[in-house]
Amino acid sequence: MKCEEAVHVCDKSQYKEASFWERLKLNIHLLYCSVCRAYTKNNIKLSNVFKKSNIKTMSLNDKKDLKETIHQEIAK
């Protein structure tokens, strides 16, 4: 497995989208690739930070309303 593929599988694995074989190949790759190990470690840290942060996002309706307001103000 090349590093580019390993990064992609790491991202898929984070969202539970990677197959068993992809995860197995990734783990084998991580045994000998320190760069991808570091990427995986940082990816896990980042995911945990977002999970703990309790970030609130705007609803789709609020986003739509804000976009319309901005367009109206620009059109003036």
Image: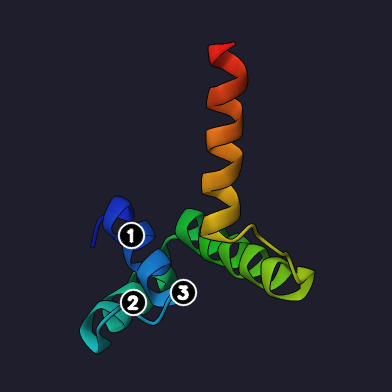
Q: Whole-percent x and y of residue 41?
A: 60, 66
Residue 51 position by quadrant: bottom right
Q: In the image, what residue occupies the spot 21% across and 84% down?
A: 21
Q: Earlier in the sequence, mark 3 or mark 2?
A: 3
- Hey, which residue is sitting farthest bottom in the picture? 20
Residue 54 position by quadrant: bottom right
Give the number of the disc on residue 8.
Answer: 1
Q: Is residue 46 left or right of residue 40?
A: right
Label 1 and label 3: CA atoms lie apart by 10 Å
Residue 5 position by quadrant: bottom left
Q: Whole-percent x and y of residue 68?
A: 53, 35
Give the number of the disc on residue 36.
Answer: none
Q: In the image, what residue occupies the spot 76% across and 75% down?
A: 52
Q: Secondary structure at mark 3?
A: helix
Q: Quadrant of the C terminus?
A: top right
Q: Whole-percent x and y of residue 27?
A: 38, 78
Q: Quadrant of the N terminus?
A: bottom left
Q: Nearer the viewer, mark 3 or mark 2?
A: 3
Q: Residues within 10 Å of mark 3 (few under 14, many from 20)?
A: few
Q: Secondary structure at mark 1?
A: helix
Q: Secondary structure at mark 2?
A: helix
Amino acid carrying label 3: it is Gln
Q: Residues within 10 Å of mark 2 (few under 14, many from 20)?
A: few
Give the number of the disc on residue 28.
Answer: 2
